[in-house]
Image: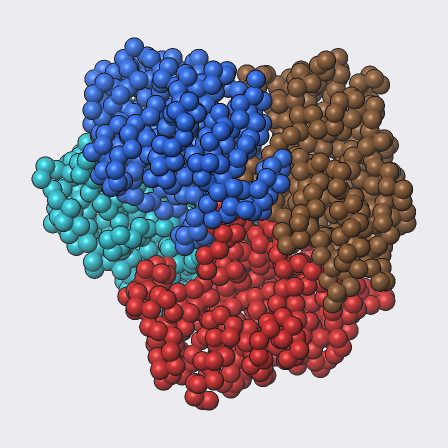
Chain colours: A cyan, B blue, C red, D brown
């Protein structure tokens, strides 16, 4: 059985990546391919790497063009997706790669986005542990018709620290997360600081001091895993590479927690997860190992001097962090095997 | 008056950078240029960017070749510099860019380096505040004949957090430092993970969990500024760029500390320092802005949700982090103006 | 039906890429995975991006380990593959990614490689036009049991200029080819000039003056297409990127040849080829568009001032230039559809 | 004696580099710093690497603001500089980094720029040999009050091939030049294809088929050296690095010319030139060796199979290719030693 899927935002990086993955998905037929100012152009002009789709012509991102598909992917600026989603049939599986439906707290939404809260949809991070019983987020995604794809930073941060909070091994204060992202995370809009001349050979922080919009989203997920309010300090940085996120997350361990306990908690959390791997001791993750793939790789160490665990996690921001996570969630929504179309190796070197 | 200087380790990145800076230093005449396995080669074969020195021939790194200069720079593996330094005349100004003489604690040395402690030399970070009175480290460097150049990570971390600890605004526990370094920080030795094919497009952590040798050095400097024991969690990462360090340092602020107090402390600490700048609010530092120069640029923000200050600091690991700091210290030792030969703009883009 | 395949040189970049592609090939079961000094290690330690193969253990590259498979891929230094191939059963499909069996001229072999000529195997570039009738090289590959995979530079150069020579539109003298390759083309051996610190931000030529070993291989292919002796000036350069080749090839056009004739010749040559695309006029190829994929993208222009055609061609050196071309040839050898396992989009940005 | 200099276009890459060099020039005091849309901003906001000039405020690029200086640097789009230059006092030394006054042929100007020809100024490439007697271009620059700084590609191409044409060793047809430039060569204007995400890991050609505006400028210089009309095929490519040009230039050698003759001609041409070096045989130039410096490094080889010489030349496009060449020319115009303020080592790695 084949499902039809429409993809909006197809001229951007997230939309392009959704198309790249769907093009290799055996259960999906790609339907309408939507854009805004680029409507009317051949996809090949904008995404010349999508070899099998070069002759597709971009259509306007209208409800008319998107409806009448089994699945609709929205890779749009926040605000735009809620407006369109509201007009799509309830039985259509709508996968929103934007922020509109991620936050449960209207107050957080207001503080960080400053517009009306569009409501909350099931959160598309299947591996997330959502309670002390070890229940996974994927249970909420089976058969869902509305899914909010997590932000790229939250995906890596939640995969990094979730197991420790779910197991009660970490303290909820003084959690610090510093992440380095490739430039595609900033999207395809043309801004001076994203010029190649500025970016190459340089690293720079942004949204420092808790100002980044992914902050409350990370806190929401960790708090759910911990069963109590978790507060983080989150600093994103821009790295001179097109793709990839390296997240370094550290939290104080509870009194008496040992390195062995930590290792067991993380390995246990992911031993049955095909897309998340705790590397063997002594191996450290590199973003390149997951480039182009839906995998996360982690490593952790107890720092006995500081009394903290340090967890490092790499993902491809456009795959596991966006389009891959979106397709994985879609598979759950459609009742397909969760890894359909996602058995991608990393592309390295 | 002109002083003569010998430079060992001249085929490596640190030694090459010392030569680059000395070549433009009006008070220095470059004498012996030493190497190990590359002795006998023209410098131009190994450092073709040092246009004015291409015909210099590398000599063996022996006491005979290095002695008989006013200044000797040692850019050697740890262990090697202590052995040579011990045989140089006491009146020679010896600047050790290696680790041998940085740590005061023999116990820390033993734990992190595992060899005999060579003793402690004045620490070559002139701007470091070393007590509650605001005394700077430069006082110890004037007229000194033995100077230990700080590690590149410690330079940025101490510049980032020093003012807050000196002013009593920060708590000594749960300090977290995550830093991204360009690959030249790993030196010029050929190792598989430093191949361009591996490095480009990838970020990777290393020495996680407090294992990196710069950890006790950072703690030593911060503890001195704080007047009490400071413990850090330090995670270094390797970034796909040849030069530069971006350090993200965060600490819990003491009860009641305001953003204005923080800003005042940092700006006050550096207002008279020509090589360290706190950027105007709203500007974030980029490593490229200090590439090739002896400057550090900082920015800070209070994160009220997390109750922490986040300080980001960029330096060029090879200049302010190594060779520039070395020459700045040498100037103090020789009684020259501190910025002689160091008025270098950054090379951007 | 499933064929078994052994891959030697699996710890290198070419071997790793063969594995990446075979892992997604529906007709192949990966058997022995061979290495030299890395034998005994888990593949995950060396190729952590090959998620589905991490637990494979590398075996020694011996005839015993490689035999008993339907297909054997040799990704070995030149010289080594001929020795092993000679001992493999004649019915085994042996695909040599090395140089041993590419050149027909023993004299050329001797001049450029300086060892005994191992003989010539069918050349694994299916799209190459090999005579004035438009016969393609793929005819020689159907059912073949020994195949010599072309070098990465020759693949791009032959795809770039082949149509013009086959159509008699180009003059055989003063052909100039300048190509820029990503660093993976230089392999995974650890050499000082391939360090990330040296490579990033830098371009450098090598093998200038006709010294590169791919020179006679390119001349051989172009001469075959032209039906007369073609002489080239070939200059390879190393570019600061891990993958990709951009080849700029230019030749004098024959008297009276028009831009329209040129366009028609190139478009006609590739209109039925799924892995080679002449871009629409006005679009120029970027190596990133073919990263990770088996595609070549070309563009050409007549320079009326100079009386020359300029053809630019991009490929991924590790895919179409090595492993993808190898698998495409294998498909022909085994009687499988030529694109089996090769419908890969590019991974961009 | 100190001269005052105004710099327009100071928010761009070329203007910023002029400032970087002038800031270290002992004979220049920097006066007005002009911009267009950025007028009124602090220089530190736009060029945070120019540490000694951060508090300068950008003024409008008007004749009033620029006049009343001994020297005026124009780093403006073509067209704009001619208009301003016409209104500056005749005794003011005007250095135009733009294209307006480079071409002698009004016909070429019309064909490649399509606007009115503003006339021709002395060409700011001091080392260029302009006749069979070996006369250098610098003779025209001494005491000049109007100077046209060469384009970055022409600088490298003319340095590469000039000696051979001046010595009568090369044939004037079938000259082929392929060059790779860092992205700063495309300026600081924000365009989609210059985004870091697009540029990193990718190479792409542009202006192919003789369409690039530097084509007639290169032909003009080579023809002058040769004393006869030289025709070139020129293809520029964009490389994933912020700075640097690698030019590969190849021409057919005249009958009977030997490798020794070639070497002698090139070495002889540059032996007395401090900014241009022919590397020792066996060394190939890397753009990084000249990053930040005013040097060009060359290497050449005779390709006996092809009957051609291949010359590779590296420069920093922003220094020797623009701002450094501009200051070098200014020194000649002002009667200062030609290398004043230009004794810059390369910044590597």
Figure label count: 0
Q: Residue furthest left?
A: A256
Q: Is residue C5 left or right of residue C201?
A: left
Residue A183 visible in the snapshot: no
Q: Is residue C206 visible?
A: yes
Q: Residue at x 60, y 37 (%)?
A: B53
Instruction: Looking at this view, name the residue that lies furthest to the top.
Output: B133
Task: Say which residue appears at 83% left-offset and 23% top-offset.
Answer: D143
For residue A222, above or below residue C294: above
Q: Locate residue A328: give its quadrant.
A: bottom left
Residue D88 x/y as whole percent:
80, 18
Q: Is residue A306 above or below residue D158?
A: above
Q: Residue at x 80, y 29 (%)?
A: D147
The percent position of residue D241, horizontal first and vertical second, equals: 56, 44
- Which residue occupies the extreme bottom position in the image? C90
Q: Position of residue B268 (x, y in %)?
A: 38, 12
> For this rendering, which residue is in front, D261 or A340?
D261
In the picture, the quarter occupied by the C terminus of chain A is: bottom left
Q: Is residue D109 above or below residue A30?
A: above
- For the N terminus of chain A, the image quarter is bottom left
Residue B95 screen position, x and y as percent: 42, 28
Of C213 and B248, which appears nearest the observer? C213
Quadrant in the picture for residue D271: top right
The vertical placement of D11 against B241, above or below, is: above
* Residue C222 located left or right of residue C295: right
Depth check, front residue: D44 or B223: B223
Instruction: State the residue at coordinates (54%, 66%).
Output: C321
Residue C94 vs residue B103, the one in the foreground: B103
């Amino acid at each position: 059985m084949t499902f039809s899927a429409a993809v909006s935002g197809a001229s951007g990086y997230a939309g392009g990546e959704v198309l790249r993955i769907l093009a290799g998905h055996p259960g999906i037929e790609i339907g309408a391919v939507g854009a805004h100012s680029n409507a009317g152009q051949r996809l090949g002009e904008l995404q010349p790497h999508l070899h099998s789709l070069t002759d597709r012509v971009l259509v306007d991102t209208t409800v008319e063009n998107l409806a009448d598909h089994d699945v609709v992917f929205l890779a749009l600026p926040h605000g735009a997706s809620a407006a369109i989603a509201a007009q799509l049939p309830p039985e259509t599986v709508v996968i929103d790669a934007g922020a509109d439906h991620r936050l449960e707290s209207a107050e957080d939404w207001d503080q960080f986005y400053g517009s009306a809260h569009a409501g909350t949809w099931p959160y598309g991070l299947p591996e997330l542990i959502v309670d002390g019983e070890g229940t996974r987020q994927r249970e909420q995604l089976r058969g869902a018709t509305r899914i909010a794809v997590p932000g790229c930073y939250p995906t890596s941060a939640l995969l990094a620290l979730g197991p420790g909070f779910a197991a009660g091994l970490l303290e909820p204060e003084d959690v610090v997360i510093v992440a380095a992202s490739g430039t595609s995370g900033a999207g395809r809009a043309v801004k001076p600081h994203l010029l190649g001349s500025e970016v190459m050979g340089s690293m720079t922080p942004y949204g420092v001091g808790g100002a980044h919009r992914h902050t409350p989203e990370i806190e929401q997920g960790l708090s759910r895993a911990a069963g109590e309010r978790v507060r983080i300090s989150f600093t994103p940085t821009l790295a001179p590479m097109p793709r990839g996120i390296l997240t370094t997350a550290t939290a104080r361990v509870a009194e008496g927690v040992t390195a062995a306990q930590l290792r067991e908690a993380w390995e246990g959390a992911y031993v049955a997860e095909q897309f998340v791997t705790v590397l063997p001791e002594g191996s450290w993750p590199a973003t390149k190992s997951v480039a182009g793939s839906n995998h996360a790789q982690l490593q952790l160490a107890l720092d006995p001097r500081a009394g903290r665990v340090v967890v490092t996690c790499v993902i491809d921001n456009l795959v596991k962090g966006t389009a891959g996570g979106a397709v994985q969630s879609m598979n759950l929504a459609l009742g397909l095997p969760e890894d359909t179309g996602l058995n991608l190796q990393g592309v390295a070197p």
